[in-house]
Amino acid sequence: MLFFLFFILSLITAHAKEDYLPSSLGNDDVDSDPALKEMSFDIGDGPETFMAYVQPDVTSFYKDVEPPASKSVTPKHNGLAGMFINMSKEPVRLYWEPHIDGERSLIEIQEPFSVGGTATFPSHLFFYTSHRDESEILIRFKVEPYPNNVYIFDPYHVEADLGETEKNLLQLDEIEREKYIKIRKSYLFGEVYKSFTGRSYLVNYPRPPPKHHMWRADYFNQTHWATTRETHFLSMPSREKLSDLRTHGKSRVIDERKPRPLVDYRSDQPLMNMTLKVLSCAPRVFEIKEFLSPIEVEHMLYLASGEDLSLSLTGQGETSSTGEIKKTRTSRNSWLERERSPILDAIYRRAADLLRVNEALLRYRGDGEFPDLGSEKSLAEHLQLVHYTKKQEYQAHHDFGFNDIDDPFQAQRFATILLYLNEGMKGGATTFPRWVNAETFEQLKVKPETGKAVLFYSQLPDGNMDDFSQHEAQKIFGGEKWLTNLWLWSPVYN
């Protein structure tokens, strides 16, 4: 199964971007990330090695200027991703409580030998109960400061007593024992990884590194550039020309020697330049100004006017700093399919060029297109259209979740592109409250500007999730905010 996964990933890489357009990429961008360091470990199968991401020293983030300090500043926001591992053969309930024996709030029900979690804060209290008897508290957890993200319930392991541990494992049948050993080894790997890198391992081992391109973020204000044939729309086509796309598969491929669709409504330049400016190195955050034209923004807002926006939902259970459950998001949203119009299709193709992936990976593939990938599903979600009005917000959260130990792909969101559709509101900035820097404990703020894109990664170059990718949509105090999200998954979309 693991060989099959690596095979599929190699195919995705091969189809990533077969026809490279001009860009700033040099050999340094193509070669292995220099922050990947060889880590030795042994979790019971003999000596092994792993290329682990070790965050560079913060002083390297300041090029041609004197670093304000020699060490990174501890951020004011001290939240983190809490990962809870149920190593028992029974399902359990994960609860949060404001204090011991306080009013409990259910986070999730976890299956045997499974992983779950929530965004949380140091000193938060959680506990597992039996699924059958909620009054039976199995274990309590008190969240500690970062990088202590991982908390386990292992009713079988007895520290420094292999005999007693083996006696306890007699309770498991052959399949259960296999799952226990697998999840236990993943935890032991994570302990070595944490000691080596200073980060918790927030996925199940083994998880291969992402095969999509990752733009380097070596220092603040570093710039990259990429080009695309999907130039800006400068005038609005008629409604008849903006009807839904009804073709799939190979028929969607555009001959690069021919003009783009609706060329008469676009810029007459053959290529459009996209400049990426590094705003943060950890997490990797980039700003791309004028990614959308005013006409494209107008079109998306027009589509939004016909949408029935519903209350936005969070992902896996989330707790705010005060412990509120499922109240961390108050916006409204809807979804726009790529096939909704030729303009949306062009935006997806432009995004593919920005991300350095083949546009076919961002849509349904039929007619035998890339049959070796084993799936016709897109690796990207529909565009999420989000609307914030006064006092609405989305508190600090991650775009990733947690995978089942038996999931061979461990599919997760890899990259997020935020597209701002308006500006001028009071509040409403996108913030990264835990960005690594040597100058301030305040959050990194990105001001919404019409047509601007922000790209950031939820994964690290070694396949781990980036806990620092936690981000927030700040509360609106005046006006309104419109934006769309585009999420790219790796290695598949689940």
Image (cartoon, rainbow, N blue to C red):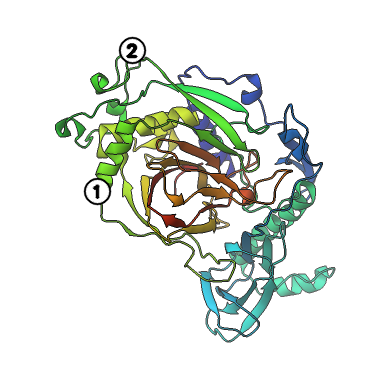
Q: Position of residue 73 (x, y in %)?
A: 74, 49
Compare marks 1 and 2 and give the one earlier in the sequence: 2
Q: CA distance from mark 1 to mark 2?
A: 36 Å
Q: Residue furthest top?
A: 257
Q: Position of residue 429 (x, y in %)?
A: 50, 48
Q: Is residue 214 left or right of residue 161?
A: left
**Front residue of this view, candidates 396 and 400:** 396
Q: Is residue 348 left or right of residue 161?
A: left
Which residue is the site of mark 2? 257
Residue type indicated by callout 2 = Arg
Element at label 2: loop
**Front residue of this view, candidates 175 and 483:** 483
Q: How many badges with numbers are in the image? A: 2
Residue drawn at x 69%, y 45% is 436
Residue drawn at x 34%, y 38% is 364
Q: Is residue 37 left or right of residue 479?
A: right
Q: Residue furthest left?
A: 240
Relative to 379, say whether 186 is above or below. Answer: below
Residue drawn at x 65%, y 41% is 462
Q: Which mark is residue 388?
A: none
Relative to 45, say whether 250 is above or below. Answer: above
Element at label 1: helix
Residue drawn at x 29%, y 16% is 259
Crowd around label 2: few <14 · some 14–19 · many ≥20 (10 Å)? few
**Front residue of this view, candidates 61 and 346:** 61
Residue type indicated by callout 1 = Ser
Which residue is the site of mark 1? 305
Q: Position of residue 113 (x, y in %)?
A: 60, 65
